[in-house]
Image: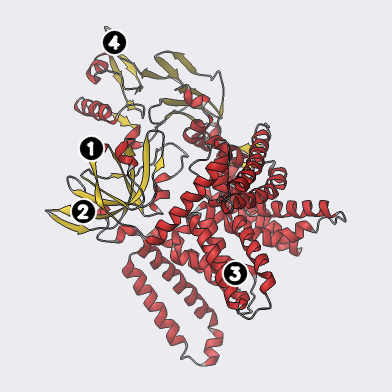
Amino acid sequence: MPFVRLIIPFIAGILLQSYLNFSPDILVIAGGSISVILLAFNFLPISIKYKAISIAGLGINALLAIIAAYIVFNKDIRQKQDWIGNIKTDSISILATIQEPLVEKAKTYKAEAVVESVQINDEWKPVTGKVLIYFSKDTNAIKLNYGSQVLFVKPLQEIKNSGNPGAFDYKQYNAYQDMYHQIFLKSNEYIITNTKSENKFTKWLLSVRSKVINTLQQYIEGDKEAGVAEALLIGYRNDLDKDLVQAYSNTGVVHIIAISGLHLGMIYGVLVWLLKPFKKARWIRWVRPLIILSVLWIFTFLAGGVPSILRSAVMFSFIVLGETINRKSSIYNTLASSAFVMLCINPYYLFDIGFQLSYAAVVSIVTFAKPIQNWFFLKNKLLDSIWNLTSITLAAQVLTVPIIFYSFHQFPLLFVITNIVIVPLSSIILFAELIVVITSIIQVIAGFAGVITTALLHFMNYFIEEVNTLSFAVYDNIQNNLVETILLYGTIIGISLWLLNKNKTLLFIGLTFLFAFIIIDSYENFYLRQQQKIIVYNISQKPAIDFISGYDYAFIGDSALSEDGYLQSFNLKPSRTLHRIKQKNNLENLYVGYPFVEFYGKKILLVDRPFKFNSPNKISLDLIVVSRNPRLYITDLANVFDCKQYVFDGSNSSYKISQWKKDCDSLHLRNYSTTDEGAFIMNIKKTE
């Protein structure tokens, strides 16, 4: 298993460079020095080589780590002199090319674009870089598609996170895709040029993708059913119902609608079966791999080339090529080699959750499926098939649980039941969809296949939604940090290897990791039990404040955030999970007499409408929170209140916030904008 040994130092190099950011000079000097040492090692006498063989091994591993670090440095677009981020974009013309069909949002169209060139001093200079462009909904934007080029004069904005506690790191997610800027363009702020910049293969793929989506929408009835059909077949997720996606996630079958190796494996199996009758022909040895690899890779690109399916495509490529030259290796080596190739192409795949879950699941299945399957022996073929599927499902969870805890903060308790039903059902649906697409030229057959596929999709969605309504379907609010995740892996690996090999030392190691995990988790619980804080969230157009005491909290803000499950999950739940808090209707030491609030002795004023108040003496306050764009002047507030801190939340317009901040600065008043700086957090010490 050579690649298993090679990939460990390679991953170490990626991590070191990502967090320590070594300069290229240091990497070149270190790499050159180690290369010289290794070269000199070859000229040593055999007796010395034998004794110092570990030094050579360390040198090779270090060299691999340095190579990986240099690949990371070279991949970082910010290191290029012509990167758009190194150029001031104020008052200069920018030419950008749309890289995908526009995605419709609630109020805008969104598209990824590549910046081609900028005009500086009447001279066009080529640049590199990607940008997210949001177009206002109008007749001008409808004309845009893949390859369209737009010209605009407007400064690019840096992509920012919401800044809310525990929120998804959207900025880093885009950075791993070389995307650091975004811009919103109204119809009068850009010009669509007469030129286009297209890649013929990409254009063909998008054309095929569009035809497949149109065919599915034509023959699959129901928005939910059509959305799942598109995601299941080609990984198109823009039409998925958000609540339905959450239901699939809560029940442990989100991998069904997140295109993965499961889909590629089924297509690989069908291709092998179709080519089986020709196995005796001489030409099949070379034609077979060409056909299989072509179909697999075209499907991979149609599915958007996401890391989970890229991993499968590379792995199957190694398997097919190995079979062609009559070479078979360990599945661990095949997995490691596919990961090695992918990380050489793009080292940032290492930080992709899909990539991590994909490899963790496959390694877990390969390692634990057979031992779990051997727990029971069933003579009945149907029951044995069900148990085989169950054992695979259980095995997949062993090494994915820590990642699920760390990234999604929940665990589906009914995953065994849902997977037993959904995995075979989704396989049938996938083949039914293929029939719909293939027979679309014959409307009668496609229509009949569409009716059956719609019924199957409706049942699958109905089953998932019903299971999701059960109060015990999911265990959520799990909060493990990175250290706890590593300790959890140490526990699982140690105890699992002990069960497989009966080595008591491994059991001791596993229990040691578990003890350390319990100590850290207990300390965090003790610390959080003492917490008292006020959090003013940064949410566009909606005010939201949590008052936290220990494990309890009370919420004051827009009612839509309490009623809309998706809005709450996206904006508020990450923070509440991070702080391990649960809502309490009557929170002690919280007194609300709108617009005044008192919490553990801290006096707060909530201003969300035009304000008029007179007082002979200034009223002392600890915090004033301004929301919903009220018409007011800071000077009027300052004349009445002696306040230590002003906060302007995300429900206000950027223009008003900037005016208020100027007024505060002129009056020497402390002020804070959640739009610019993220959520405002006030930690309160105990008064008793």
Determine whether label 2 and label 1 are within 8 Å by CB.
no
Q: Which mark is residue 612?
A: 4
Q: Position of residue 348 (x, y in %)?
A: 44, 58
Question: As displayed, is residue 338 above or below residue 165?
Answer: below
| Secondary element type, mark 3 | helix
How far apart are the alpha carbons under marks 3 and 4? 72 Å
Disc 3 target residue: 334
Disc 2 target residue: 118
Q: Nearer the viewer, residue 641 or 71?
A: 71
Q: Residues within 10 Å of mark 1 (few under 14, many from 20)?
A: few
Is residue 409 at least partly visible in the picture?
A: no
What kind of residue is marked 4? Lys
What kind of residue is marked 1? Asn
For the N terminus, give its image quadrant. bottom right
Question: As displayed, is residue 355 above or below residue 644?
Answer: below
User: Between disc 2 and disc 4, whose residue precedes?
Assistant: 2
Q: Position of residue 645 (x, y in %)?
A: 32, 26
